[in-house]
Amino acid sequence: MVPIGDRNLGGDMSEGTFLTREGCDKLKEELKILKTVKRREIANALEKARQLGDLSENAEYDSAKQSQAINEKRIRELEEKILTARILDNESISSDKAYIGAKLKLVDIDSKEEIDYMLVTEDEADYGQGRISISSPVGKALLGRKIGDIVNIRVPAGTLRYKITDISR
């Protein structure tokens, strides 16, 4: 676990990729699938394409080779992220401000709608699950804020106005 303290977790991450434990586990699962299931599928597609004959004008073979290159590139990316991952230790991160891993309760000032978000890195972002990236406009605007703050966020559709009502881990 990495103690983070009160640092701005949206800044330079050259020391490694900050991830929650859950996010790291998700990347490991994706890596496992790419190395086993996906590699096997691609190998089968390559074998089928080879059986069709002349490889110089074989679109199926070219497509399978391209899929193989994309898969291997993603495997290397995931291995690097996992190798350099810095797992966030929620107990050592300030809970009075919004940092990576924080769960925020917000109220839309205009519509009075309540919204729940969790601030995460790009690798863990999933808007449908309420997990927003700290590099998104909303995530950037919320980072480092505290309970009671009113945040105005410029987005392509206009300006969002939120009040932070709770921060938890």
Image (cartoon, rainbow, N blue to C red):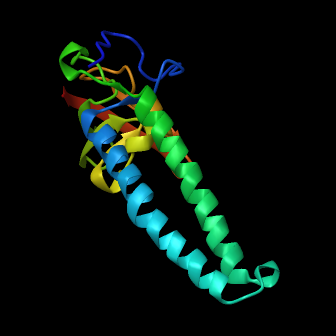
Q: Residue at x 39, y 65 (%)?
A: 37
Residue 158: percent from the left, percent from the top? 52, 47
Q: Is residue 151 above or below residue 49?
A: above
Residue 14: percent from the left, percent from the top? 54, 20
Identify the image quadrant of the C terminus.
Answer: top left
Task: From the viewer's perspective, tell me whether residue 150 is left or right of residue 147.
Answer: right
Q: Is residue 74 above or below residue 136?
A: below
Q: Residue at x 34, y 45 (%)?
A: 28
Q: Report the front residue among 144 and 60.
A: 60
Residue 26: percent from the left, percent from the top? 31, 47
Q: Report the front residue among 2 and 61.
A: 61
The single residue placed furthest to the bottom in the displayed view is 52
Q: Residue at x 26, y 34 (%)?
A: 21
Residue 77: percent from the left, percent from the top? 53, 42
Does the rendering let one see residue 135? no
Q: Is residue 59 above or below residue 39?
A: below
Q: Report the front residue among 42 and 13.
A: 42
Task: From the viewer's perspective, tell me whether residue 39 is left or right of residue 3.
Answer: right
- Residue 35 placement: quadrant: bottom left
Q: Is residue 152 above or below residue 63?
A: above
- Residue 27 placement: quadrant: top left
Identify the image quadrant of the N terminus.
Answer: top left
Task: From the viewer's perspective, tell me whether residue 104 is left or right of residue 32.
Answer: left
